[in-house]
Each structure stands twice: as structure tokens, then as C-alpha cells.
Image (cartoon, rainbow, N blue to C red):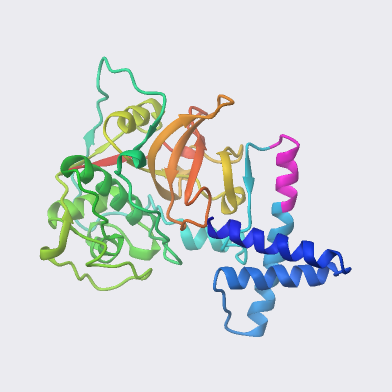
Amino acid sequence: MKTGLVFVATVVAFAKSQLSIGVTLENLLQEEWMAFKLTYNKSYASPEEENFRREIFIENRHKIARFNQEYGRGQWSFVQQLNNFADMLHHEFHRTLNGFNRTLSARVGIPQSSTFIPSANVIFPDYVDWREVGAVTPVKNQGSCAGCWAFSAAGALEGHNFRKTGRLVELSPQNLIDCSTNYGNDGCSGGLMNPAYEYVRTNPGIDTEDSYPYEARNGPCRFRPETVGAYCTGYVDIAEGDEQGLEAAIATLGPVSAAMDAGRQSFQFYSDGIYYDPQCGNRPDDVNHAVLVVGYGTEPNGQKYWLVKNSYGPQWGIGGYVKLAKDANNHCGIAIQASYPLV
């Protein structure tokens, strides 16, 4: 059972045991708050800070309850749940975790990427999930570092390296955060996937996660050639906004790095279902978060989705994944800046 469900089960069990003895709402809220802190190992610098975070938690709790009531009335295609971000204001959440930054410019020249040409005369399957063949590593947690771009790039390199070698090797996002600044990336303040690929191409190589573990902060470059886990020979861009091209690449080649608009408040507490928010942007300037698209499919009710690996930790979403509406006018801009490495 994932952590979020354990938290919910803890709260429900307590509520049932206490309602029979006339517990007040304030008591219930306090117990839920205590369960939240225990479940996610939360601590605060001062009583004032804890009181502030508790008020945010209570407000988010109310918002999620209202949202799920609307879901019950058929107004949404997904549900929400309290998670480890429940003590954060939305703008804090967005600023801290979403670090795809199109405004960065390289400090050294970045070659033009190759253009994706879909395979001709190929019938694509209705369902693809690269996890099922062993091409995807476990979900990671980027913590309070806006290094989503590094996790997206490392994840794509892991998948394509697996297809080349038959071995799944976990690669180091920290290596990219610390060492690709000359290529235009800005560590925990944001970055892009193609400059990360270019760093790995010219370095050459990226270290394994075991040899260069994640620290959720900027640090000096400590790359070691003797612990390289994968190489990169180039990278390919899928045409901007081309969902059919994205489908073709995922169906025939492997996981694909992508960017999306993750700035909607509804995204913070996504738990299950097909994520579709009418306010989600699909223009180049709207995308703000890097992810890894590892598959696609169709629900029994006919709703199509992209299967997207996130880096918010396994307690978020469906074990760290989101099913994003597919073939829905490039929802959330998922095909705006999609690319994959050549290995």
C-alpha cells in the first residue's frame, strides 16, 4: 500500500473510533495533522512555522474534499488525495518543484538536434508501457530541488540504454545537476533536457546513481569516468505539438523526455484517473515541468491517456505516475518539447 493510502487509512480508522465518543471537529483536524506529520516525517523550525503549515494543511484538506465532491458529480475525470505536499501553498509547490526553464541559454554552443522521422508503414499498438519490459527505473523524489529536467533526461537515457544493452542501469540526475551548467542548465534552479544530453555526449558519459547519488542541491562536479553507466551520441526532437509523432516515438523507440504545464493547482494533489484540467496550457510558454512519457493507452470508458513518470516521489499520483489526457489538443503541452537521446 502506498504511503498516501496508509495516511488516509490511519485517519479513517481514527475518525471511526472517535466519532462514537463525540469527538469535536477540532480534535479530528488535530489528529489528522499529527498523522500527516508522522506519515511524512515532517518537522518545523518553530511553533509559529508549524501553526502556519497546519493552517495550510487544513485549507488544502477542505479544497480536496470539495474537489472530490465535484468529481462525484461528474465534473472531473480524476480524483485528489492529501499527500506530502499538503502543508505547502500552491505557489510554493510550483516554484520548488517545477524547473523546466526554456529561457536558459547555453554558455557553450549546443548543436542542432536531429529531426524525428516516424517509421513508415507501421501499425502502432493501442497500448504501450515500457515498464513491462524492464526499461524504466523506480520513481525518484526530486525533493526541494527544481531538477525535474535532470530526472527526465536521466530516465530517457536509462530507457534507451536498456534497449541497446538489455541492462537497466540507474543513472545519476545529480551528475547532470552539478556538471551541465556550462551547457545552459542551472542546477536546482531549472534546466532543459537537450543541454543535459549534450553534456553526456561530449563529457563523455553519465555516472551511475550508485556512484553519484542524489543530494537535492547544487554541488561541485564530481564526475568519474570509471563509474559511467551510459553514453549519448546525440538527441532527436519531435516536432513541436505533434502528438502523433510522440506516439510513434514511444511505440517504436522507447521512453521520451517531455515538458508539460504542471502549474495548475489541481496537479498538486492528483491521485488517480485521467488528468484533464481545462485551464492547463498547451503553448510553448506554458510548459514548466519536465517528465518522462513511458507509454500510452485507453481506459475502458474510451478515454485515451499518456502514461507519464513524474519525479515527485512514489507517494504522489499513481505510485508516482500520472495518466494525462491524450489526443486532447496537446493537453498541458505534453508534445511541445519532446525529445529522446541516441545511444
Q: In this view, does 106 lie to the left or right of 103?
A: left
Q: Residue at x 71, y 54 (%)?
A: 63
Q: Nearer the viewer, residue 174 or 26?
A: 26
| Farthest-out residue, top | 121
Quarter of the image where the C terminus is located: top left
Q: Position of residue 81 (x, y in %)?
A: 63, 53
Q: Position of residue 250 (x, y in %)?
A: 33, 33
Q: In this view, does 112 lie to the left or right of 136?
A: left
Q: Residue at x 76, y 68 (%)?
A: 29
Quarter of the image where the N terminus is located: bottom right
Q: Where is residue 71 in the image (x, y as percent from the top left)?
A: 70, 40
* Residue 73 painted magenta: yes
Q: Which range of residues does the magenta coloring cover?
A: 65-75
| Farthest-out residue, bottom | 46
Residue 221, by quadrant, is: bottom left
Q: Position of residue 283 (x, y in %)?
A: 47, 38
Q: Is residue 32 left or right of residue 191?
A: right
Q: Is residue 126 left or right of residue 229?
A: right
